[in-house]
Amino acid sequence: MNIKRYNRQIILPGFGISTQEKLSRSSVLVVGAGGLGCPVMQILVSTGVGVVGVADFDTIELENLHRQYLYSEQDVGVPKVIAAVEHLSKINSEIDIIAFQEMITNKNVLSIIHNFDVVVDCTDNFATRYLLNDACYLMKKPLVYASLFRDEGQVSVFNVEKEDQMTNYRDLFPVPPNQSEVPNCNEAGVLPTHSAVIGTFQANEVIKLLSGSAETLIHQLLIFNTKNYQSMKIKFNENQEKAGPKTIEEFQNFDYEEFCSLNKNDEINSFSELQSFLNHDKSILIDVREEDEQPKISAMKILELPFGTLEENLERLNGYTSICFVCVSGIRSQKAVKLLKSHFPDKEIKHFKSGIKSIVQ
């Protein structure tokens, strides 16, 4: 370890070489290499955390670059974890960086988190969030959580015992909202400053945890608004009656998509399945993105009807018996399924879960 490299933090009162050595012996897994994950990884690597893991199955898209500034234009189309390892290694060659290019599931997550001291939740969907929380709870792994919604961000620390309690995500949110009712950044929008600020708070909690700070957000939820700089902390307690798997066997058999009200029967999950669906004469694919969103779909029969205009265009859909919706990441298309089923209960209505990127390469 090159002490000179970390001199500016070592000279902080209460930090010192001993804390730096503690960081260098520590390992952190970042799940999600997007708007939150990028600043978190960059800070942890720059601070000298000895091992940084990154788990993500997605590839880099042009619209990621405005907030996921770890990546460059040359990385578009490259798996995020591959690009992350390359760029993070250039920031600090002393750090071991481990890539997991796979979707986190209840079949692989326990083996992935096993060797890490702290796990960081930088995901953007409720099914993975509850899954990761439960895995860390069962494995007694500290979990640093953050989420974004437009100008507001949340940060907390879970699965750390303090004052005879060990709280987690389920103590805060025992029942998940419907995924279609809570847009992610692709749907709601986000400024790069916002994800950077909340990601920095999240990384700061990781560093405090590893260094043994007493001021960590344990049993507390920080809510911060980057528009007006208002913030508040909500204290919460452990609920001994909270739901969720209590054993590893229960965890591995728990259906997180069903728990988060994701109806698998309404989904089309592969391009070949979509093509088969559209082979019928009275079938149609409907793009519910806004008119100016790119890229456009040209290789199949399609209607462009922004989500906000669906109800005023219902008569255009009377002639179709099978309808599939598509958007960026499956949020608006899932809402469209729910809306249209209320008007056409006898039609076959589905959505393309993986979104536009799986159609337009």
Image (cartoon, helix red, strand yellow):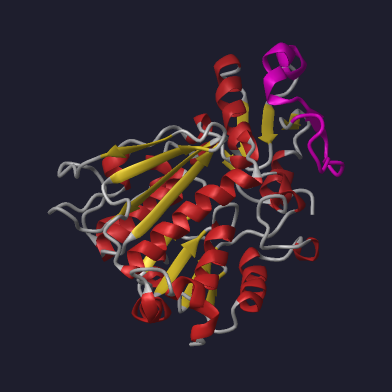
- The residue at 83%/35% (across/down) is 301
Q: Is residue 319 left or right of residue 53?
A: right
Instruction: Please give the count of numbered marks on the rendered protein.
Output: 0
Does the magenta-highlighted stretch encompass residue 298? yes
- The residue at 75%/35% (across/down) is 280
x then y, percent, for residue 51: 46, 77
Q: As drawn, which residue projects farthest toward the right?
A: 298
Instruction: Say if 270 sits above or below 179 in the image.
Output: below
x then y, percent, for residue 75: 75, 65
Instruction: Say if 105 sits above or below 290 in the image.
Output: below
x then y, percent, for residue 3: 49, 85
- The residue at 76%/25% (across/down) is 305
Q: Is residue 312 left or right of residue 19?
A: right
> Nearest the camera: 218 or 7?
7
Q: Is residue 116 left or right of residue 356?
A: left
Q: As drawn, which residue projects farthest toward the bottom?
A: 1
- The residue at 19%/45% (across/down) is 238
Residue 102 visible within the image: no
Residue 228 visible within the image: yes
Instruction: Say if 52 sits above or below 312 in the image.
Output: below
Instruction: Say if 17 sits above or below 210 in the image.
Output: below
Does the magenta-highlighted stretch encompass residue 335? no
Image quadrant containing the C terminus: bottom right
Q: Residues in magenta?
A: 290-317
Q: Is residue 226 left or right of residue 13?
A: right
